[in-house]
Image: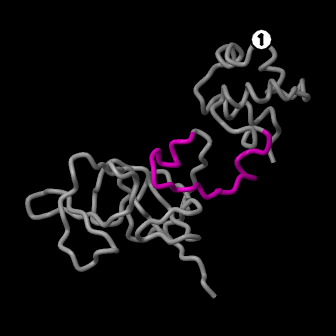
Amino acid sequence: MDSLGQRINRLRLKADLNKAALARKVGVSDVTISYWESGAIKQIGHERLVALADALGCTLAQLLEGEARLRPTPLYLRGQPPVPWLDPNANHFTLSDEILAGVGWQGECYLVTPAPGERFDYLDSGDLAAFGPTENCDRPGRYLIEGAGGLYIGQLEYGNNGELLFSSVSDATSIPIPLETTERVVGRLLARWRKDSA
C-alpha cells in the first residue's frame, strides 16, 4: 500500500500540476508540498486535506485510502438530468473483456442503479448496469437518452435513410420512430445484472 505522500505525488502528476501550482491552490508553500510528498511531514490537518483533495480533483477517500481500497459504488440514476457520472466524485471502473465480449467499448464505465422510486425501461429497481458516457450511437443497442421529459433508456438503431430510430420495451410491438431533435444520447448501456428475486 502506498503512503499518503506517494498518493499526493501521484494525484498531483495525474492532475498535471507542478508543486508550486498545487501549493497556490491549497494555500501553502511549494516546500510544504515537497515535505508532504517525501513524508517528512506526516501529519496534515483536516482543513488542509480537504483543500488538497479539492485541488487534486479527487475525493478525500481517494486521497487518504488510495485507489486500491475504493470499490465501485453504484450511482443513482434519476429520471431528470444530469446524468450521475457528471458528478466530479463519481468513480469509474474497468470491466473485463470477458464481461464486455462483443460490446466494443474502450471508454470509462460507471456502475448505475435506479434511484429509489425511479422506473426505467430495461432497468428494474435493484438492477445494476454498466453505462459508458457517450453522445453517439455507434451501433444498435440500448442507450440512455435525455429529452424534454427527462432521462430514459431506449433501443436505438439507424434507419434506411441514416436517421436514428427509437423503440422502447414498453411498446415492443410498435415500429421504431425517429429520435426527436430535442433528444440526445448521453450514455450507452454496456452490461446489466438483474436483481435475484428468489
Magenta stretch, residue numbers: 64-87
Q: Residues within 10 Å of mark 1 (few under 14, many from 20)?
A: some
Residue 82 appears at what percent x and percent y? Answer: 47, 44
Q: Quadrant of the C terminus?
A: bottom right
**Residue 124 on the magenta span:** no
Residue at (63% x, 29% y) in the render: 13
111 or 197, which is in the foreground?
Answer: 197
Q: Horizontally, is 10 left or right of 193 in the view? A: right
Residue at (18% x, 64% y) in the render: 177
Instruction: Give the quadrant of residue 76.
Output: bottom right
| Three-letter code, disc 1 | Ser
**Which structural element holds mark 1?**
loop
Residue at (64% x, 57% y) in the render: 72
Instruction: Give the quadrant of residue 24.
Output: top right
Q: Is residue 41 above or below residue 120?
A: above
7 or 75, which is in the foreground?
Answer: 75
The residue carrying mark 1 is 29
